RNA sequence: GCCGGUGUGGCGAAAUGGCAGACGCACAGGACUUAAAAUCCUGGGACCAUAAAAAGUCGUGUGGGUUCGAGUCCCACCACCGGCACCA
């Protein structure tokens, strides 16, 4: 517990927060906007249009405003970006630093189901709390650009972007999205005069099958407790990411987004952006690209039907089974084949004798949840179908099995098993006594059983092809060419990435701008609402639960659902990720009612060039994005996907949204455990703020350690930086005022201004030329803070500020010019205290040219930092024996003789042969003796 | 199992291949005070030694290597954290 207040932060902080609000100090200006001459930006950049000033777009991951309020993890990233935003402003850049609310989401809806309170109400309350908390930290956001994903003025454009996706297809030839109208029909559907209803329906179906937003009937993850389906990315270990409820596979009609079309670009473009290796790796793994070949195996139904061999080769018959393999070079080693139990050919190929066993097995597998299936993975199970396949390379018959270690959802749902060179196949073959045939020789002569690495092909010859002797890479190429030439296979690239399941059975989300109609063939089809009908608002409801029939809650609003012309509205809503996919674009032009973002604003803030401007643009897109790792494969992948679609369609000017991205590390509790209510180790930011103030809180979160590291909270650590701020205060303020302060430190905030005015600067602060040592201390600090901020090393920057203050406290005379520059350095970190002292310094020693928030960052003079006298360590055989104080430019020869003459060195070299002497001027001397 | 990250005092940490431990916390001693709080000053890796010191030895997860010199570079391993995981 802190004792007496170190300084009246409780008066200073509200005062300056109100001041910044009043003057809209951190407002950023769009191209063409007229800046009032009174605005601090205009004072720093007089008579220059805003778009001529180089921009810096620094973005936080906007929070979901939960009922629990801000936790200490939020301000960690926000403080880092705020420090940089303030620093970049001081460096003369035009900074865009916005904040908003990712406010659609399940908690508000669940609360609504429980209490009947409309989620809008809950959301508004939570936003109010979050905004108050965030504002109390003194962040320099441009609040005129605040966005809220649940605001119809916002989600109107989320729906609009959905229409763009709906009305586009991915052209593999141009490798980009194009308007659906540009999609050519296959010849049989080409217009030939009067088109029948049937042809029209076929055309519609054809287009619908190519859209980036499409309807699918596939099995999806259904969560009973949440009453909704979930995307792959939202399912972790067979449970919902939110709440940890069980999920099951269930075939349902759902909206999907064709993110798989962008798999290659999402992967490739990672090379163009500056993200951490681990994050890029997570995205790479999620996309899961693997290169290999598809091979068609003909099915030979023998045994129980002898002679009935159907030697299908080209895959055109249903009786060929296509497998995917990354190791086509091991084709000769395929001794059996495995289908996923769900594979659609299983029933067709199963022989009567095996049917009972196969059906049993399938039923067993269906009972298992995916979690169980993964947990039991160690123990391989499966049954023989009775059928055989023909290996196309050597016409050998191999048995076809089904086993749940083969997944229906990956590749073709079928594999050729090469037990000699695949761990899983090896286990399976061992268990079921299937033949194991070596086809790769390990390079080092190790055991080939289960050897999965590269080597040399062996035992891989037939009448038409031989791979023997070829190294793995070459064998892959050769066999793939052979497969292609013989029309029984081809080179393929496979991805783990699945299309994005985009609909939810929820109330609190964006409704789809889609209606369903019935075609003349009696089948339902979908159409979009016109853009003019946006925003499409959700209907008011009293009951937010799904209907008894399992329909989404929106289906309860029958007036809303049923339209006069007989069509019905789509009742699913979009997932929470929709709003966060593009919020960084809305910030650019948040109030625009005509378009989601004006091209001029987009080009200025995101583009690489601006016509007619000399502004330099070091980076395209968002210059720096800071947030947690938890969104590695969710938000960050989805947003990149949407951005690429908008890029292809010409709405944005960069292929990637976030040029540089930094993940802040997790803050643990004081017990080094994850903060959680159950552990009782949660730190409430409001409590820390009341006790130590915002500046101390900000400073501590940055001083804890490197931004990206996981680190434990320490309240005594907060006291440390708080004491530092107290020393800064006392460096400036005179002792008489200190006494007065002690007597008044309980003053209420509304008396704050009056009280603060009574406090005077100390008499040691004078307008005088600084001593060389004082200048040196200042410039060392400027250098360190500047370099550390450029490298995002906030902790060491703060320690440099502490070093300066520790020294400055000893000065009897404190030159105003030195202190003024120090305040500019302090401002990004502790803006409130810096402002208060800056205003006092200006009142006493003459007004500064710029308000502190836009005061130019001081340059440092390296010449001032050169030492005249340096300490040179002297080592003997690398061990430190003495330290000599010498003139900095003492020549090497003299350093050597000085070192040898040292009393402390002599005992270690006397009587020994000096083999070598390493002398590095200004650095060290190392004497090597025998 | 695979991928990524991290291992340095009692704790958070710092160190372009060149004096390991800056800065801060906690701790101890002192000054101020009737006293406390606050503040200021001093000390501090371990071992050995001593009345006290100096000197010395060891020391950045472990074991090797490169180098005049390694926390830093290379090889092999161990532990912890995060992610992925029957992905053919």
Image (cartoon, coloured by chain):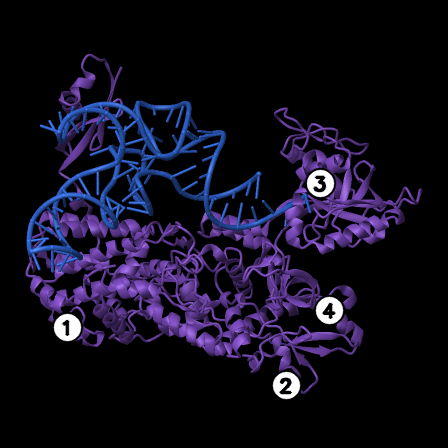
Chain colours: A purple, B blue
> Closer to the camera: disc 3 or disc 2?
2
What whole-number distance in Å separates the C-alpha atoms at marks 3 and 2? Answer: 59 Å
Which residue lies under the disc numbered 3? A480
Closer to the camera, A558 or A546? A546
Mark 4 Cα-neighbour bin, 10 Å: few <14, some 14–19, many ≥20: few
Tell me whether marks 1 and 3 sit on the same chain: yes
Which residue lies under the disc numbered 2? A559
What whole-number distance in Å separates the C-alpha atoms at marks 3 and 4? Answer: 35 Å
Q: Which chain carries label 2?
A: A
> Closer to the camera: disc 1 or disc 3?
1
Q: Which mark is first along the chain, 1 or 2? A: 2
Q: In this view, does A534 lie above or below A917?
A: below
What whole-number distance in Å separates the C-alpha atoms at marks 1 and 3? Answer: 83 Å
- Marks 1/3 in contact by CB < 8 Å: the verdict is no
Residue drawn at 82 percent across, 32 percent down? A463
Q: Is mark 4 on a helix, strand or loop?
A: helix
Which residue lies under the disc numbered 1? A755
Closer to the camera, A99 or A43? A99
Tell me whether marks 4 and 2 sit on the same chain: yes
Q: Which mark is first along the chain, 2 or 4? A: 4
């Amino acid at each position: 517990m802190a004792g007496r207040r170190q300084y009246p932060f409780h008066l200073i902080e509200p005062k300056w927060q109100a001041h910044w609000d009043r003057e809209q100090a951190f407002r950023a200006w769009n191209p063409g906007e007229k800046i009032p001459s009174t605005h601090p930006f205009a004072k720093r950049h007089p008579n220059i249009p805003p778009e001529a000033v180089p921009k810096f777009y620094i973005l936080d991951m906007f929070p979901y405003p939960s009922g629990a309020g801000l936790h200490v993890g939020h301000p960690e990233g926000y403080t880092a970006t705020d420090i940089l935003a303030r620093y970049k402003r001081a460096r003369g850049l035009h900074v865009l630093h916005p904040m908003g609310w990712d406010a659609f989401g399940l908690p508000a809806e669940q609360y609504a189901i429980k209490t009947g309170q409309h989620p809008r109400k809950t959301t508004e309350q939570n936003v109010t709390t979050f905004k108050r908390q965030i504002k109390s930290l003194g962040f320099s956001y441009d609040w005129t650009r605040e966005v809220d994903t649940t605001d119809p003025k916002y989600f109107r454009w989320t729906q609009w972007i959905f229409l763009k996706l709906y009305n586009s297809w991915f052209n593999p030839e141009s490798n980009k999205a194009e308007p659906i109208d540009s999609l050519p029909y296959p010849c049989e559907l080409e217009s030939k005069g009067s088109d029948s209803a049937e042809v029209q329906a076929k055309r519609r179906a054809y287009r619908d099958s190519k859209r980036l937003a499409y309807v699918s009937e596939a099995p999806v993850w259904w969560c009973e407790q949440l009453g909704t389906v979930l995307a792959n990315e939202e399912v972790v270990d067979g449970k919902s990411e939110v709440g940890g409820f069980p999920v099951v596979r269930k075939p349902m009609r759902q909206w999907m987004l064709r993110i798989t079309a962008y798999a290659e670009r999402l992967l490739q473009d990672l090379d163009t952006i500056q993200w951490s290796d681990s994050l890029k790796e997570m995205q790479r793994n999620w996309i899961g690209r693997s290169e290999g070949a598809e091979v068609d195996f003909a099915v030979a139904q023998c045994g129980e039907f002898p002679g009935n061999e159907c030697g299908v080769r080209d895959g055109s018959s249903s009786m060929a089974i296509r497998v995917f393999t990354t190791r086509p070079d091991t084709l000769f080693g395929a001794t059996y084949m495995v289908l996923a139990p769900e594979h659609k050919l299983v029933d067709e190929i199963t022989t009567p004798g095996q049917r009972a066993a196969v059906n049993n097995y399938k039923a067993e597998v269906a009972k298992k949840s995916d979690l169980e299936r993964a947990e039991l993975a160690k123990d391989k199970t499966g049954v023989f179908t009775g059928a055989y396949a023909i290996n196309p390379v050597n016409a050998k018959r191999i048995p076809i099995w089904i086993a749940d270690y083969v997944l229906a959802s990956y590749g073709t749902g079928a594999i050729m098993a090469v037990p000699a060179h695949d761990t899983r196949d090896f286990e399976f073959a061992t268990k079921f006594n299937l033949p194991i045939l070596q086809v790769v020789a390990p390079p080092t002569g190790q055991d080939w059983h289960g050897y999965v690495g590269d080597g040399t092909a062996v035992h891989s010859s037939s009448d038409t092809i031989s791979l023997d002797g070829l190294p793995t890479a070459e064998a892959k190429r050769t066999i793939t060419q052979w497969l292609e030439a013989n029309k029984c296979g081809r080179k393929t690239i496979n991805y783990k990435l699945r299309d994005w399941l985009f609909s939810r059975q929820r109330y609190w989300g964006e409704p789809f701008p889609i209606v369903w109609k019935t075609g003349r063939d009696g089948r339902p089809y979908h159409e979009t609402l016109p853009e003019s009908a946006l925003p499409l608002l959700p209907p008011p409801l009293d009951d937010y639960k799904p209907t008894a029939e399992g329909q989404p809650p929106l289906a309860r609003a029958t007036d809303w659902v049923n339209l006069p012309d007989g069509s019905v509205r789509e009742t699913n809503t979009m997932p929470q990720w929709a709003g966060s996919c593009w919020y960084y674009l809305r910030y650019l032009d948040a109030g625009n009612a005509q378009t989601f973002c004006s091209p001029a604003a987009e080009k200025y803030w995101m583009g690489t060039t601006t016509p007619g401007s000399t502004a330099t643009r070091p980076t395209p897109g968002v210059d720096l994005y800071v947030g947690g790792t938890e969104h590695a494969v969710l938000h960050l992948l989805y947003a990149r996907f949407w951005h690429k679609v908008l890029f292809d369609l010409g709405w944005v000017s960069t292929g990637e949204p976030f040029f540089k991205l930094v993940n802040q590390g997790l803050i643990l509790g004081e017990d080094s455990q994850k903060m959680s209510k159950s552990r009782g180790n949660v730190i409430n930011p409001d409590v820390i703020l009341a006790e130590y103030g915002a500046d101390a809180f900000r400073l501590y979160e940055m001083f804890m350690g490197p931004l990206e590291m996981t680190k434990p909270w320490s309240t005594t650590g907060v006291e440390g930086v708080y004491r530092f701020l107290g020393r800064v205060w006392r460096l400036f303020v005179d002792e008489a005022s200190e006494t007065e302060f002690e007597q008044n430190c309980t003053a209420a905030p509304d008396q704050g201004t009056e009280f603060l005015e009574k406090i005077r600067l100390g008499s040691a602060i004078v307008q005088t030329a600084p001593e060389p040592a004082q200048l040196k201390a200042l410039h060392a600090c400027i250098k360190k803070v500047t370099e550390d901020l450029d490298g995002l090393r906030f902790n060491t920057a703060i320690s440099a500020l502490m070093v300066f203050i520790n020294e400055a406290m000893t000065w009897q005379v404190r030159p105003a010019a030195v202190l003024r520059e120090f305040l500019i350095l302090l401002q990004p970190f502790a803006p409130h205290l810096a402002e208060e002292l800056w205003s006092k310094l200006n009142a006493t020693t003459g007004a500064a040219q710029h308000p502190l928030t836009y005061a130019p960052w001081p340059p440092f003079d390296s010449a001032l930092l050169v030492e005249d006298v340096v300490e040179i360590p002297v080592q003997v055989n690398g061990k430190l024996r003495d330290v000599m104080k010498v003139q900095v430019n003492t020549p090497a020869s003299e350093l050597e003789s000085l070192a040898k003459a040292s009393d402390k060195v002599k005992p270690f070299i006397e009587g020994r042969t000096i083999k070598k002497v390493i002398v590095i001027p200004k650095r060290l001397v190392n004497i090597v003796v025998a």
